[in-house]
Image (cartoon, grey):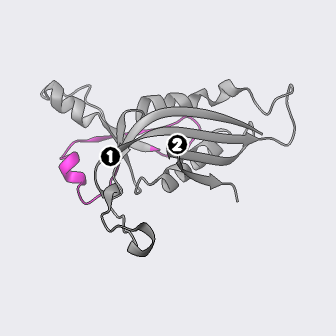
Amino acid sequence: MIDKTIEGCYGHRVHNQHLVEEFSQMTVCKCKRLHGHQLTLKVFLEADHLKDGMVTDFHHLNWLKKFIDDYIDHKFILDKNDPLYSHFIEDAELTPIFIDGVPGPVGHIVDCSDCSLINQDNRDWLESFFVVNFVPTSEYLSKWIFEIAAIKMASLGRIVRVDWHETPKSRASYLNG
């Protein structure tokens, strides 16, 4: 088994958060607020047989690093179903994002490259979002990356685990099976 670590920063909002005071010692749902994290993403890959002495070359996961760098790092991951969605992205047209070998879009962005009437500040604002169709909790984000990577890497091995660290002390993992 090998694992690859990818780092970045991102923001999100967990609009459906509810706390149980008995366990949390508080009732304020801070994750409902806009906030950010230092991301450490770990993807674990295994194979039944080593090819040329390797599960696969670590460079074969560079597509995932590029995806994180291009679409997640220093972006705000926004649930399309967030009740405040229209306040973030009014009537902007979304552009689907595809990864070769993965069916369907993995998310959406606002592409302002042809938006000549939008000033730079508004363009920077709109291009700071990566839109998904789920509440962007660490648990869902690890599952999302697992599912994308499992399809993309299937010919080279099996993704068996994805860890999504939102802080050095808080991690969600999604495991195969």
Q: Which quarter of the picture shows residue 3?
A: top right
**165 or 43, which is in the foreground?**
165
Image coordinates of residue 127 in percent, x first then y, are: 28, 33
Q: Secondary structure at mark 1?
A: strand
Q: Cα distance, mark 1 to mark 2?
A: 16 Å
The circle on residue 35 is: 1
Q: Residue furthest front?
A: 25
- In front of the other: label 1 or label 2? 2
Judge whether residue 81 can be spotted in this image: no
What secondary structure do most residues of the magenta stretch adopt? loop
Q: Return the disc, 1 or 2, that comes first in the chain's sequence.
A: 1
- The region drawn magenta spans 78-106
- Crowding near the residue tagged with mark 2, few <14, some 14–19, many ≥20 C-alpha atoms within 10 Å: few
Count of numbered marks: 2
What is the quadrant of the N terminus in the image?
top right
The circle on residue 168 is: 2
**21 or 70, which is in the foreground?**
21
Q: Is 129 within the magenta?
A: no
| Residue at the image position 28 percent from the left and 53 percent from the top | 33
**168 or 127, which is in the foreground?**
168
**In the drawing, does residue 89 fall left or right of residue 60?**
left
Judge whether residue 26 can be spotted in this image: yes
